[in-house]
Amino acid sequence: QKEVEQNSGPLSVPEGAIASLNCTYSDRGSQSFFWYRQYSGKSPELIMFIYSNGDKEDGRFTAQLNKASQYVSLLIRDSQPSDSATYLCAVNMDTGRRALTFGSGTRLQVQP
Amino acid sequence: GAGVSQSPRYKVAKRGQDVALRCDPISGHVSLFWYQQALGQGPEFLTYFQNEAQLDKSGLPSDRFFAERPEGSVSTLKIQRTQQEDSAVYLCASSFASTNDSPLHFGNGTRLTVT
C-alpha cells in the first residue's frame, strides 16, 4: 500500500472555478505536510505547507489538514489556465528523518 | 547562484557504464537531498546530507548507488554499472535548516536515459 495516496486525474475545471485536490496518508504520526506544483518537464516548486489541523490560506490557495482522518487537501480559488500542472502532496512521515514521502501527483487542467 | 543547480541536464548512458550527477545547492543551505522521479510518479527519496554528513541513505536502491558531499556544499550522485531501470529524472533539493519544517528547494534535475 502506497503511503501517500492521490487521485492521478486529470482533474478538469473551468477557468474561475475552485479546484479541490485531495491526499490521504497512512502514518498517523505524520507531522508536516507540503503541496508542490510541478509543470511538465520542470522541477517541483513549493506551494504551501501546513503543520496544524485546520485551514491555512495564502492568496488563492488554501491547505486543509485533518489529522484524525489522515487527510490533507489543497483548494485553488479562481483557477487560471496557468495553474494547469501536476500537484504533488508530500508528507514527513517520521519526525526522526528528514525524508519526504511524495504521492504520485494529481494532474490539474484548467480549461479557458 | 540563486537556485539549486544540477548538471548535466541530460545524460544518456549505455547499460553497464558509470555516471556521475552533480548538484550545487543554494549557498548556505545545510540540508541536501537526492530524489529519483520516474515518469508519471512522484519523487522517491534516495539520500540526505546535513552538511558533509550523510545521515540517511535508506532510499538508495542498491549498492551501485553512491552519494557524497565532501565539503558540505556540492554533492555528487554516482551510479555504477547502470541498468535500464535506472532511467529516471534525478532531483537534488536543498533546504536552509536541518528541521522538518524547512522547505525544500529543488533543482531542475538530470534526466538519465540508460540504453
Image: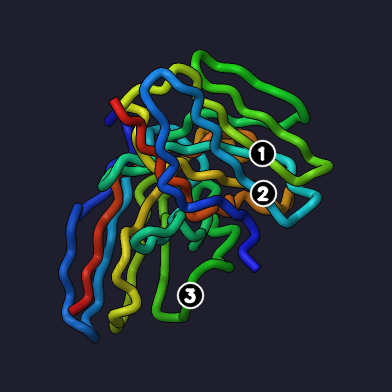
- Mark 2 belongs to chain: A
Residue A60, image x, y percentages:
49, 17
Please name the residue that numbered disc 1 is placed on: A72
Looking at the rendered structure, the secondary structure element under dot 1 is strand
Please name the residue that numbered disc 3 is placed on: B61
User: Is the C-beta separation of discs 2 and 3 under 8 Å?
Assistant: no
User: Is the C-beta separation of discs 1 and 3 under 8 Å?
Assistant: no
Q: In the drawing, does residue A64 fall left or right of residue B45?
A: right
Residue B10, image x, y percentages:
18, 58
> How far apart in space, not on screen, are marks 1 and 3 (Cα)?
29 Å
Please name the residue that numbered disc 2 is placed on: A24
Is any atom of residue B25 visible in this view?
no
- Image quadrant holding the N terminus of chain A, namely bottom right
Residue A64, image x, y percentages:
67, 29
Q: Amino acid at mark 3?
A: Pro
User: Is the C-beta separation of discs 2 and 1 under 8 Å?
Assistant: yes
Looking at the rendered structure, the secondary structure element under dot 3 is loop
